Image: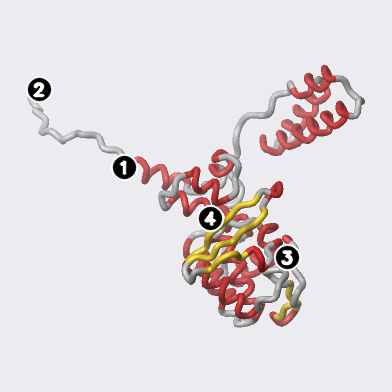
Amino acid sequence: YKHVQAIKTRLEEQGLAPATVNRALSAIRGVMAAAWHDGQITAEDLAHIRAVKPVTGSTEAAGRAMKPGELAALVRTCAEARTPAGARDTAIVALGYAAGLRRAELAGLELANLLEDDGQTLTVQLVGKRRKQRTVYVSGGGAQAVRDWLEVRGREPGPLFYAGRSGGHLIRGQGMSPQAVRDIIVRRAQQAGVEHATPHDLRRSFVTDLLEAGVDIATTAKMAGHESVQTTQRYDRRGEEAKRKAAGVLHVPYTRQTLDVRA
């Protein structure tokens, strides 16, 4: 207990964020649990280590939600490339925002994940973190961007998004890595004149815009593949303006009266 407490204190003294310190403590608890299973420490020692309390407090949330104009500029930059890679990148951005997919999910998509397209809504079945399956629906411009990419890609089985090479050409049949997906969005954002943007910023925008539009947080959590609404809340970037709008829905039944200044 005293050793783990000392590590916690030292990390706090270094000025690290509470979440960073707590991740370190969680890692220590995980290693010690494995040590207990292996008979290297006693159950009592493990209980003492687990008794070290996490750091409380909060810091400014990482990342941001993109503004509508920024998203439009990013999509337009990809589409106006008029190359196979441009069509692919447009579809990646479209799914990253309209379906809120993680970069690993985007990289791991196969053509077989596209289950249905009725001309209005595209249905995508995917396996997310911890092998959890979920179904997402994409409509409007997002679905059309994917359809246009499929016209370029073709319908042969395999990765949905192909790796690229110079000149906007693609390597047919070869999938992409999550890092490649991130690099594409960062590069396209720079070309579009958009301040630093990442795949997770698209995901944050997805959550923020759904909540802003009035979608309840439980539904939003399911769409994002979150196990709890607390996780979804951490993606909410509406900030003070959301609280200002919320205050406007409350009504105090007050009618202004003329004051009697002689009172």
- Looking at the rendered structure, which numbered label has been put on residue 180? 3
User: x and y percent of residue 127 in the render?
Assistant: 67, 54
Looking at the picture, does residue 149 appear above or below residue 14? below
Q: How is the image coloured?
A: secondary structure
Position of the N terminus, as image quadrant, is top right
Q: Residue at x 48, y 44 (%)?
A: 217
Q: Is residue 140 left or right of residue 175?
A: left
Q: Residues within 10 Å of mark 4 (few under 14, many from 20)?
A: many
User: x and y percent of residue 206 in the render?
Assistant: 53, 55
Q: Is residue 247 left or right of residue 221?
A: left
Position of the C terminus, as image quadrant, is top left
The reply to whether residue 186 is visible in this rendering is no
Sequence-first tag of 2 and 3: 3
Sequence-first tag of 1 and 4: 4
Give the alpha-carbon distance from disc 1 to disc 3, as whole Å: 44 Å
Give the alpha-carbon distance from disc 4 to disc 3, as whole Å: 21 Å
Looking at the picture, does residue 148 appear above or below residue 31? below
Q: Residues within 10 Å of mark 2 (few under 14, many from 20)?
A: few
Q: Residue at x 73, y 61 (%)?
A: 179
